[in-house]
Amino acid sequence: MITRGADNRCYAPAANRDDGLHRRLKAHAEPITVPVLRLDTSASVPHCTHATVNYLPAERALTALPGPNGAPAP
């Protein structure tokens, strides 16, 4: 099936884009188990930064940051 996009160009989906593909991908997907971070992007940058830092567990925040020259943190 060929569809017309908002840019008035014609698009044909790839041959494997069907319900079967969705079911196969869903069957092999891993659930996301971490809490969701929702930021109000209309808030100030300091507010969003504070919310983000508080969202990260302290041990993950420290170990996720790269060390000097991109080396893993100690």
Image: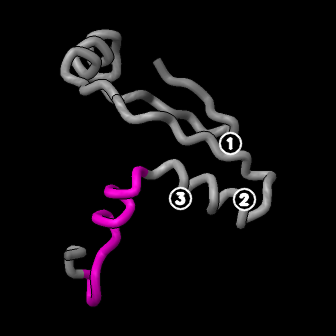
Q: CA distance from mark 3 to mark 1?
A: 40 Å
- Horizontal placement of 57 versus 72: left or right? right
Answer few, some or many: residues within 10 Å of disc 2's Cα (few below 14, many 20 plus, some between 14 and 19).
few
Q: Residue at x 73, y 46 (%)?
A: 40
Labelled disc at residue 64: none
Instruction: Name which residue type carries label 3.
Output: Val
Above/below status of 10 relative to 68: above
Front-lying residue, 51 or 8: 51
Q: Secondary structure at mark 3?
A: helix
Instruction: Report helix, strand or loop for mark 2.
Output: helix
Q: Label for residue 53?
A: 3
Q: Position of residue 35 (x, y in %)?
A: 45, 34
Q: Earlier in the sequence, mark 1 or mark 2?
A: 1
Separation (CA) of disc 1 from disc 2: 37 Å
Tell me which numbered mark, 2 or 3, is placed earlier along the sequence: 2
Residue at the disc numbered 1: 7
Is 52 part of what is drawn in magenta?
A: no
Q: Which residues are magenta?
A: 57-70
